[in-house]
């Protein structure tokens, strides 16, 4: 039985320019590095803050190396309290 793939959540701080290019660029880069853009991704139009679910830190770092639309990415730590 395969283990479910857990996605890490990242807050991306987007540049306030090239607004129409953001979504196509992020989709393309995720695809290039083995991630997938899903409808569950939290993009907020013209807002500079996006929350993306990305499979690994390596993919997140590679995405940041190639993007012109995002400035920073921050890992969102979630706590599971029982």
Image (cartoon, rainbow, N blue to C red):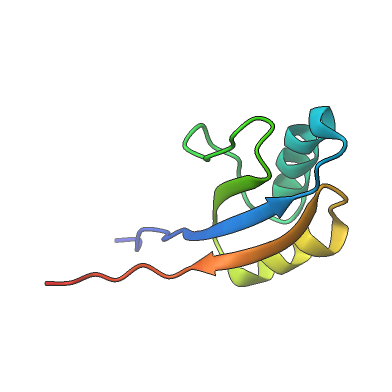
Q: How many numbered marks have been drawn onto this rendered protein structure?
A: 0
Look at the picture and state if 80 lies above or below 28: below
**Residue 25 on image: x %, y %:** 80, 40
Look at the picture and state if 5 lies above or below 18: below
Could you tell whether 79 is left or right of 7 in the image?
left
Task: Name the quarter where the N terminus is drawn.
Answer: bottom left
Q: Quadrant of residue 26?
A: top right
**Residue 19 on image: x %, y %:** 80, 32
Q: Return the residue nearer the eye: 36 or 10.
A: 10
Could you tell whether 11 is left or right of 20 in the image?
left
Could you tell whether 34 is left or right of 70 in the image?
left
Q: Return the residue nearer the eye: 72 or 55.
A: 72
Q: Return the residue nearer the eye: 32 or 53.
A: 53
**Residue 32 on image: x %, y %:** 77, 50
Could you tell whether 22 is left or right of 13 in the image?
right
Q: Quadrant of residue 78?
A: bottom left
Q: Residue at x 71, y 39 (%)?
A: 27
Q: Residue at x 46, y 58 (%)?
A: 7
Q: Residue at x 58, y 57 (%)?
A: 11
Task: Name the quarter where the C terminus is drawn.
Answer: bottom left
Q: Return the residue nearer the eye: 74 or 56.
A: 74
**Residue 22 on image: x %, y %:** 78, 37
Q: Residue at x 73, y 34 (%)?
A: 23
């Amino acid at each position: 039985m395969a283990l479910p793939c857990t996605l890490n959540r990242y807050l991306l701080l987007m540049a306030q320019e090239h607004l129409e290019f953001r979504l196509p660029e992020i989709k393309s880069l995720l695809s290039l590095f083995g991630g997938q853009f899903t409808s569950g991704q939290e993009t907020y139009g013209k807002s500079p803050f996006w929350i993306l679910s990305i499979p690994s830190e390596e993919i997140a770092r590679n995405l940041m190396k190639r993007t012109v639309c995002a400035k920073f990415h921050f890992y969102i730590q979630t706590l599971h309290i029982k």
